[in-house]
Image: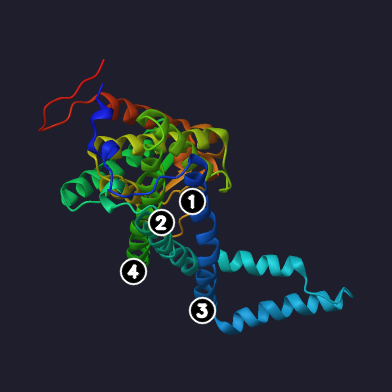
Amino acid sequence: MFDFSSSPLIARRTPGERSFRLFVDLLFAWSIAFFVPLIVGIVPGALATLVLGINGLLKLLGDAVSSGMEGGAGQVDAEAVGKLTERISATEGYRVAELFGAAWVIAVTLFVCLAVCRRSLSTMGIERKGVAKNYGVGILLGVLMPSAVVLISCLSRASAFEGYRGNVNYLFLFFVLLGYVIQGAAEEILIHGLFMTSLFRHMRWLPSVLISAALFSLFHAANDGVTLLSLLNVFLFGAFLGLFVIRTGSLIGAAALHTAWNFTEGCVFGCTVSGFPSENSLFTVSSDAARAVTNGGTFGPEGGLAATMVMMLALIAVLFLPSFGKKRQDTL
């Protein structure tokens, strides 16, 4: 087994840094993950309004108000407003803007690290050294792992590969890719860059990985189609990413892996990504609703047993495979 306790990231400290209680570290992570997207969510809504068109928005809003008045309630029809909200949030413009909005999560997290905790970026695993190599390895794993999940699901006949979708909006896919680059980096910087490394100040590497993985899973608990199995798989994915960060001593590879996983799953295979459906993709993979336990159902492939198998293999690999190009580090 790889000696994770020897990772330089665990012992890395900044002179004069501030260390807070575990509850405060948890509060930082939860506040950033919950309140920042909530506030920034106003921006995607505004951009989606432009996608709908001002006239269309005014008409829908007018219908909502008038139906409430005609009903004698003297107020806006809540059901009509709900339909309006659903239509706005379902637009492609909203989803792209939502992904780009994750940049604020990055900004706030870095502010907390640098200004509040007085820590350097290197303590989060953000360094220039080995950036290209780590990012490349992350992209490779981020493509292979979800591809393996889809392959297992198709071989078990829980899913079916339908082929090239046709009429692909490549410009939209490009912007989604950029959005996933930002979103993947945001989640990794918050969960494993700030929170997990803060836990290193309180406890050993294993509980730090498990607690950060539990928080990562909890952040997905409200997504569409969520099940206990999907939360378990997200937990396993979070644990794998945490171990990957510790083993490489860098956050860069995990951010790339996270980005490539989401893009491959959603924009290459057209699958739902953690409850978020993909409207544009290169290919189409259909899922048998009766085999949701295997294919993940409406949560997406990472919510099924196929993903569980891949995650378990990935965990075994990151725990036990020797390092290439370096002296092997083992521990009993």
Q: Earlier in the sequence, mark 2 or mark 3?
A: 3
3 and 1 marks in contact (CB < 8 Å): no
Q: Residue furthest top?
A: 332
Q: Which mark is residue 171?
A: 4
Q: Foreground residue, 300 or 124?
A: 124
Q: Which mark is residue 119?
A: none
Estimate the spatial distance between the alpha carbons at disc 1 and disc 4, rounded to whole Å: 36 Å
Give the x, y percent position of residue 115.
37, 59
- Of badges 3 and 1, nearer the viewer stands 1
Give the x, y percent position of residue 45.
54, 71
Q: Earlier in the sequence, mark 2 or mark 4?
A: 2
Q: Foreground residue, 146 or 246?
A: 246
Q: Quadrant of residue 328?
A: top left
Amino acid under disc 2? Val
Estimate the spatial distance between the alpha carbons at disc 2 and disc 4, rounded to whole Å: 39 Å
Above or below 244: residue 110: below
Q: Foreground residue, 90 or 46?
A: 46
Estimate the spatial distance between the alpha carbons at disc 3 and disc 4, rounded to whole Å: 18 Å
Label 4 crowd (10 A; few <14 / some 14-19 / many >=20): few
Residue assigned mark 3? 50
1 and 2 marks in contact (CB < 8 Å): yes
User: Disc 3 on helix, strand or loop?
Assistant: helix
Label 3 crowd (10 A; few <14 / some 14-19 / many >=20): some
